Image (cartoon, rainbow, N blue to C red):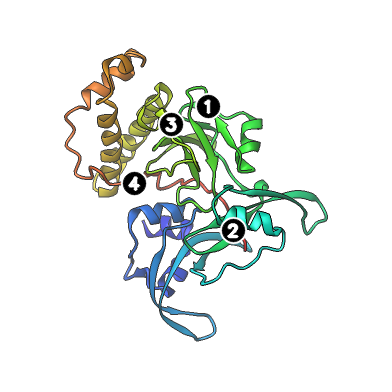
Amino acid sequence: MKEVLENQLPLKDLERVGLYKGGSLDIDSDNLNALKRGNMTDLVELKNVKGDNGFEIEAIEARLSVVAENGENKLRIDPVYKDVQKHPLLNEQEHEQLVNGHLPNIKKEVIDREGNATSEIIEFDKLTNQFLSYDPRKIKLPEAINNEVISPEKKRKLREGEIITLSDGTEVQYRTSDKNGLRSNRNALVLSVLLDGGISYLLVTGIARLMGRETAEEKSYSTGYLTALKEVEKQLERKQQKFPNDKSIANELNVVKHEFSNASAMEPAQLNTLRTKDADDVMNEKNVNDPDDGKVNAVNDEDNDIEQSRGRGR
């Protein structure tokens, strides 16, 4: 298990900020999953932070993320800033639009270090009171969402922070400042990612709402989502057979069962819109005893987690 974590996380950096002690990580599962996927955590309190130059900070609140530097995974620490610093690419109006939440992001055309014309997407993170930017070319996206393959054009839009709409009405937007790396008009999504030549499934729950939008889809479950959720369940069951003593897999299965249980509360007319197999699976989950009821988790294939943004900058 430690070898797997070392491949995913910079354990020495985490140890330096007090989050890795005696071979164990002192961080909740939601934030741990965010780190594994390359996303930003929520605000985390760090104590006795030791810097490379010998300085030590008694306590600090910050958001954490894992970024690639010179081929290695490094821990990035984004503290809370007292005052908002101006972004060199934004004019005064754009600055105010992002800070006040009138726009989710702004796209700017720039020239990279190699002299190539490219784009930079800028967001404002209210938790740390700073602007975040990323290079769309560095964003890795799923092959499918809720069992629907994402076209090249929709991938382009996602990378550039635009909202895409799936055939079932699901709306999705990439957000580098969000813990889950995206926002949607649905609370949960199943991402299909290409890893080692095969497809792996990732259930992401607790997704934040799209800015300024509230739709009926938030409280509904599409056929595509339930079909993909079934694949997540099968994937976890295979892992459980391989690692029967791993409690984290059992917890992740409970999250999946909780989603099926939620879906079983739909009106009969809604259930009838599902394929017979899916409807039966949903109804069979009605009486699941879920010890993690109400807890928001992201279910991962721990050996092969999706990598998200590696291009954040201030």
Q: Are marks 2 and 4 in contact (CB under 8 Å)?
A: no
User: On residue 132, which mark appears?
Assistant: 2
Residue nearest the observer in this picture, 252 or 235: 252
Q: Which residue is mark 3?
A: 215
Secondary structure state at the residue bearing disc 2: strand
Q: CA distance from mark 4 to mark 3?
A: 23 Å
Q: CA distance from mark 2 to mark 4?
A: 25 Å
* Amino acid type at image mark 2: Leu
Residue 53 horizontal/vertical position (percent): 54, 84
Among numbered discs 2 and 1, the one appearing first in the sequence? 2
Q: Which residue is mark 1?
A: 166
* Amino acid type at image mark 3: Thr
Q: Tell me: 92 left or right of 203.
A: right
Height in image: 249 above or below 25? Answer: above
User: On residue 297, which mark appears?
Assistant: 4
Q: Residue at x 67, y 55 (%)?
A: 93
Among numbered discs 4 and 3, the one appearing first in the sequence? 3
Residue 287 horizontal/vertical position (percent): 16, 29
